[in-house]
Amino acid sequence: MPYAAIKGVKAVKSRTDVLDEASFCYKYTVFEGNLVVFETVSYEYKFEAVEDGGSLCKISMEYKSVGDVEPTEEEKSEGAQTAVKTLKGVEAYLLACPDAYA
């Protein structure tokens, strides 16, 4: 899996931890590969309906550091930006291909 969203990361493995259609929640964990300072990074996306007919996505990130090394704020920020880029990529695909989810 290419993971160019984080500087220096070439490839990783990931697994789906939660896919709950009833609560509109998706959580996955990125592990193995050259994650630099992270042993694992988990992303959780929770979608909620809003009054105007759209939706709100809440994104959270948990990480486990390699050894005792704590990631810098910049490295944590890159991880958070990865979550947003992923969501924007999914959104662009779904808008371009409405038959994929109809």
Image (cartoon, grey):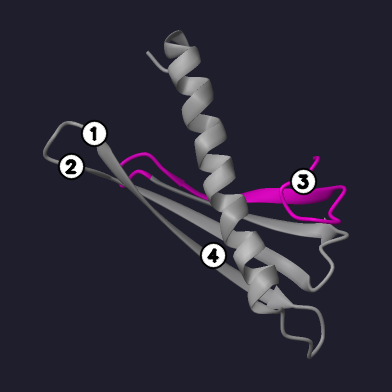
Q: Give the image quarter of residue 4.
A: top right
**Residue corresponding to mark 3:** 3
**Residue corresponding to mark 1:** 54
Q: Answer yes or no: do the residues labelled 1 and 2 have beta carbons within 8 Å?
A: yes
Q: At which x and y percent is residue 91?
A: 47, 30
Determine crowd level at label 2: few under 14, some 14-19, many 20+ residues with C-alpha closer than 10 A.
few
* Mark 4: amino acid: Met
Q: First in sequence: mark 2 or mark 3?
A: 3
15, 59: nearer the viewer: 59
**Residue corresponding to mark 2:** 50
Q: First in sequence: mark 2 or mark 4?
A: 2
**Residue farthest along the bottom direction in this orientation:** 68
Q: Is residue 61 above or below residue 50?
A: below
Q: Marks 3 and 4, how far apart in space?
A: 16 Å
Q: Is residue 53 magenta?
A: no
Q: Which residues are magenta?
A: 1-24
Q: Marks 2 and 3, how far apart in space?
A: 31 Å
Q: Which residue appears at 64% of the width and 61% of the height? A: 79
